[in-house]
Image (tube, helix red, strand yellow):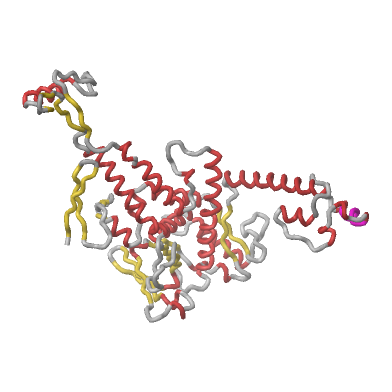
Amino acid sequence: MQQVLIMRILGFEISRVKKSVDMVSVESIVDNAGVTYSVSDDIANNDFVQAFKSLPEVAFPVMYIITRMRNAEIVLCRYADDSEMWSSDKRLYGEERLLAKRVKAILERPNFYQNFNEFMEQYFLQKYLTGNAFVYATGVVNSDSMWRYVDSLRVLPTRNVTIDANIKSAYITSDGYGDMIRGYRLFDGGVTKTIPQEFVMFTRDMQPLENEVRMKGLSRLVTQSKCIKNLYEVYDARFNIYNKRGALGAIVNGKHDADGTSAMTEKEKDNIRGEFKRTYGITGKRDPYALIDVPVNFVKFGASIEELQPFKETLLDATQIAALFQVKKELIPRDGNSTYSNQEQAEISAYNDMVIPEVGSFLDSLSSFIGLKNVGGGYYLKAKWDSVEVLKKNVEQKANSDKKVVEKELLKFNNGLCTLNDVLVAIGKEKKPDSIYNKTKLEMSEEELSVLSKLNINGKD
């Protein structure tokens, strides 16, 4: 059942079809392919792909994080000593040499149409916008030593994936996904392909809250459903003001008689219309001001863009959505933005709080999925961020800051104001049990001072 809603927004009547559902429907949107999507249906289904395509407030924080993930240099490391396999000073032999060659090939081109940055971008877009990401390893016969046999790694479109859950297996008694998931069904090219559970790396953005039978996770954007709906409404209202605003106001008669204001005659109305059309306006050689031979007043209709303050409203919504991705408000594009220094610190925070941990978690899952952790003493993929200028600058600043703290604390020690253990605590180190570390310099004996001199503690080095 459908009913037509008539709303008055800014003085204009706008009709909208409302479905008989608990959630208020938002205007349907048509994408580039001509497929109609209902915004409310997408939100109800925990799918924010269309919101990403059409709302810059949703697209900005997602793309901000993903574009910075591309700055990672991915390397293969040994668990034994955390050394890099591709270091120029190492020679590799046997299985280790094969492992390094195969993994390097995967990182250069995981499939025929994507490099690793593009592959990783698609993974995180699916994860953030739909709440789930599925990575399918093709060409493998079994899940053992997958790195050795895998032909390609592909991110599956979450919308097209159905989880074949084992409803007889309870979450509380299951030991792994293999107990709960029989497989995955992918609808692709008009046919449905069944994929064994062990050949798919399944990760979720947020865990389902109600019960584990649902299996698919939630996008973090579901917590901002009201903000996203509000943004659609604000953009629709702004469009109607700009494009369908109707009359700006009314010209009314300014003449009065004994009974009050009198109405214009039809001839007076026609004369005013004629004057405006022939002579006045802002284009060509027309005049910007009108000269009218009858007294008139102007009554404004509705509210202006400035009075409604939609830009303030959208900024508040954008700030909340960006916060989900650890993107601080200083980084949101807007007029009168923060200083460069504040933006730089906010970017460092985005790297430390979101980008680096998220890439680290992804690489850890991928290392387990393709079997790197089970080879010999174990191997893993690691992200290096040495090429990121803002992080290098931050490391240098921190080193200089730490040096100043050490110098200050050692100066206090050399003046007999604290112990060596006080110095260690002040610079974030653990206390030492030796008695010499619990004494001020004034409390030490000659023998202890002699030992101290060998430690080269002078507050400068």
Tell whether 1 sits left or right of 45.
Answer: left
Rendered location of residue 45, percent (x, y) = 32, 62
Magenta-highlighted residues:
447-452
Residue for point 83% across, 62% down: 434
User: Can residue 214 be seen from the camera position used here?
Assistant: yes
Question: Considering the image in quadrants, where does the N terminus appear?
Answer: bottom left
Q: Is residue 277 above or below residue 386?
A: above
Residue for point 79% across, 46% down: 411
Q: Main secondary structure of the magenta part?
A: helix
Q: In this view of the protein, which residue sits in the foreground, 337 or 150?
A: 337
Rendered location of residue 91, percent (x, y) = 66, 60
User: Can residue 137 be seen from the camera position used here?
Assistant: no
Residue for point 87% across, 54% down: 452
Q: Is residue 180 above or below residue 445?
A: below
Q: In this view of the protein, which residue sits in the foreground, 434 or 59?
A: 434
Q: Quadrant of residue 201?
A: bottom left
Rendered location of residue 382, percent (x, y) = 57, 59
Rendered location of residue 55, percent (x, y) = 35, 48
Tell whether 231 sits left or right of 83.
Answer: left
From this viewpoint, which residue is outermost toward the left? 266
**Magenta stretch holds residue 153:** no
Image mark count: 0
From this viewpoint, which residue is outermost toward the front? 258
Q: Quadrant of residue 22?
A: bottom left
